[in-house]
Amino acid sequence: MTHPATVHPLVSPWGRFGLYSFFIDAPEPAIVDTGIASSPAEGMAPALRAIGRRVEDVRWILLTHGHIDHVGGAHALWELTGRRAQVVIHEADAPMLRSRRAHVAEYLAGRGRYLGDHEGEAKVTAAAEAVISGEMEPTLLVRGGETLSLGGGVTVSVHAVPGHTPGSVAYVLDGQRAAFVGDAVQVHGAANGFPGYVDPAGYRAGLTYLRDRVRPERLYLGHPYRRADGTPYGVELDAAEAREALEQSLAVESRVADAACTCLEAGLEETRSPYSPFAGAADALGYSGDPTLEPSPFFTSMHGYRMRNQNA
């Protein structure tokens, strides 16, 4: 009989955020997401020693998506395993593991178009150099539908949940319905108070899939996303909290979609508002957060609705 794999959260500090990874204690141990360059040595290794485990024994590095606070430590962690761990990422997000420049290109094509920061490209370039431990080729590219064996009968299924990024995935511990979703479930957002996704339709479809098909008994989030009253969920949700977070995420997306569509139908207008040219959407939603704070989810999502409208 296969024993359930135990999951241990691993947290590393970074600015105003806490960076969360998860250790799956299986015969072939796995770590889901890797924080930034310093996270493996300064956060993961000490935390694993505290529970009697060694970072050197990790055999799977499972990346939920390609953003720097999730893949930044991948190369450093891979090195600590003696380059023996398999590094897994969806093929659509693999460019962000292979190249620091891909993160700059993403910025310029999306939120950077609205921030009006003449030093924005240089800032993102510097951040990518500082917090991504190394460019690398993944060991295994996935699309969704794969099953990974962690030994001893422990398996992880891969589920495509695009939206936050084109290559966002959920890793689900089979038989336990424990789902690691990275940033694919955002409720009311994290520190910026707004959910961020490049593909609104994909984001909504991913949420619906998780709610109706995966039906997680445990949901592990990439950050402590927040309820309507601003209180954080934390990163380990039980079945009831998971259902609530998924339902609230869908409700929030619906509200944001309505505001964005109304704004787009009225016509975009450049103004002095920090939310320009989407000030109408911010007003309709009562959003008063700072849209310039990276990762600027307000502009990321608004741009996603704008692209969807143009391609309709």
Image (tube, helix red, strand yellow):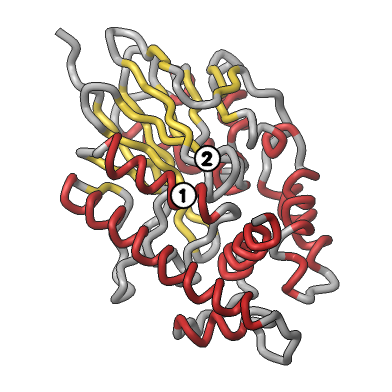
Q: Position of residue 189 (x, y in %)?
A: 43, 64
Residue 302 visible to an observer of this rendering: yes
Amino acid found under the numbered disc labelled 2 = Ser
Q: Quadrant of the N terminus?
A: top left
In the rendered structure, the answer to whether residue 267 lies left or right of residue 175 reads right
Residue 294 visible to an observer of this rendering: no
Q: Quadrant of the C terminus?
A: bottom right
Crowding at dot 2, Cα within 10 Å, few <14 / some 14-19 / many 20+, comes out as many
- Farthest residue in the front direction? 312
Residue position for label 1: 183
Q: What's the residue at 57%, 65% (across, down)?
A: 297
Q: What's the residue at 33%, 43% (across, down)?
A: 220
- Quick one: 255 or 240, which is closer to the camera? 255
Q: What's the residue at 63%, 69% (across, down)?
A: 299
Asked which secondary structure carries label 2, the reply is loop
- Tell me: residue 75, above or below residue 111: above
Label 2 to label 1: alpha-carbon separation:
8 Å
Residue position for label 2: 168
Asked if disc 2 and disc 1 are in contact, CB closer than 8 Å, the reply is yes
Q: Position of residue 275 (x, y in %)?
A: 63, 81
Asked which secondary structure carries label 1, the reply is loop
Q: Position of residue 263 (x, y in %)?
A: 59, 79
Q: Earlier in the sequence, mark 2 or mark 1?
A: 2
Amino acid found under the numbered disc labelled 1 = Asp
